[in-house]
Image (spheres, grey):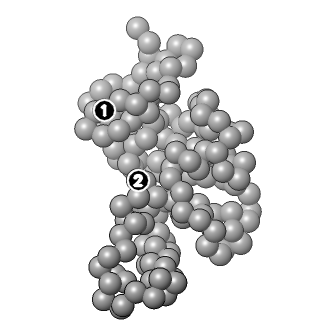
Amino acid sequence: METKENKRKLNRYDLDDQTVFTGFANFADAENYTQHEGGKLVEVAFKDGNDNPYITDEAGLIDKKLHYYVDAGDEYKFIHSTDPGFRKYADELQKIKAKLTQSPPDERYLANFEIENAEDPIIVLKNDQFESVTSRERSKYLKHAKVYEIGVSVSKS
C-alpha cells in the first residue's frame, strides 16, 4: 500500500494489471476522481484482518452509492462519521466522557472534540451498545471484519 496525496489522502494498491485507489471521503469524491483522473469505480474488499484488497461486488457499494461498509456479523455495527446516526452517538459519547471526568457543563461541549477531530472516526457498537471508537484503516483488523470500500481502478500502462 502506498499513500498518494491528490487534494486528499488516498491509498494506492498495485494489483496484477491495475492500480486501485481507495480512501475517498464519500462516493461523490470517487466519482469525481474517475471523471478527472480516468479509471472506473470498483468495490474493494479487505478480509481476514489484512491489508490485501481484492475487487468484488459482494457489498453492492456501487449500486448503493456508498463509499464504505463493514460486515462484522450480526452483533457488531460500524457507524462511519458520514453516516446519519454518527452525530447522535458522538454526542452521547461526549456526555458520558464529561460525566466520567466530572468536567463543568460548559466544558463538556467546548473542550471535548476528540471524536470530531479523530481521523475518519468509526463508532463500533456490539449488540447496540457502544464498544469503541476506531478509524477506517484500523477497522480492517478488528472483529474479523469484512471491510468494503469504494475504489477507482486504473489500468497499468
Q: CA distance from mark 2 to mark 1?
A: 16 Å
Characterize the local packing of mark 1: few (<14), some (14-19) or many (20 or more) Cα atoms within 10 angstroms.
few
Which residue is located at x 28 percent, y 33 percent? 6
Along the horizontal axis of the image, is 5 left or right of 130? left
Which residue is located at x 30 percent, y 40 percent? 8
Q: Position of residue 50 (x, y in %)?
A: 65, 36
The kind of residue tagged 1 is Glu
Circle 1 — which element?
Answer: strand
Which residue is located at x 35 percent, y 70 percent? 113
Circle 2 — which element?
Answer: loop
Between residues 98 and 151, which one lies in front from this camera angle? 98
Q: Are marks 2 and 1 in contact (CB under 8 Å)?
A: no
Q: Quadrant of residue 107?
A: bottom left
**Quarter containing the C terminus:** top left
The kind of residue tagged 2 is Glu
Above or below: residue 130 compared with residue 141: below
Above or below: residue 132 compared with residue 56: below
Q: Residue furthest top?
A: 157
Q: Position of residue 96 (x, y in %)?
A: 51, 83
- Judging by the rendered image, the residue that carries numbered circle 2 is 119
Mark sitting on residue 5: 1
Q: Position of residue 80 (x, y in %)?
A: 49, 59
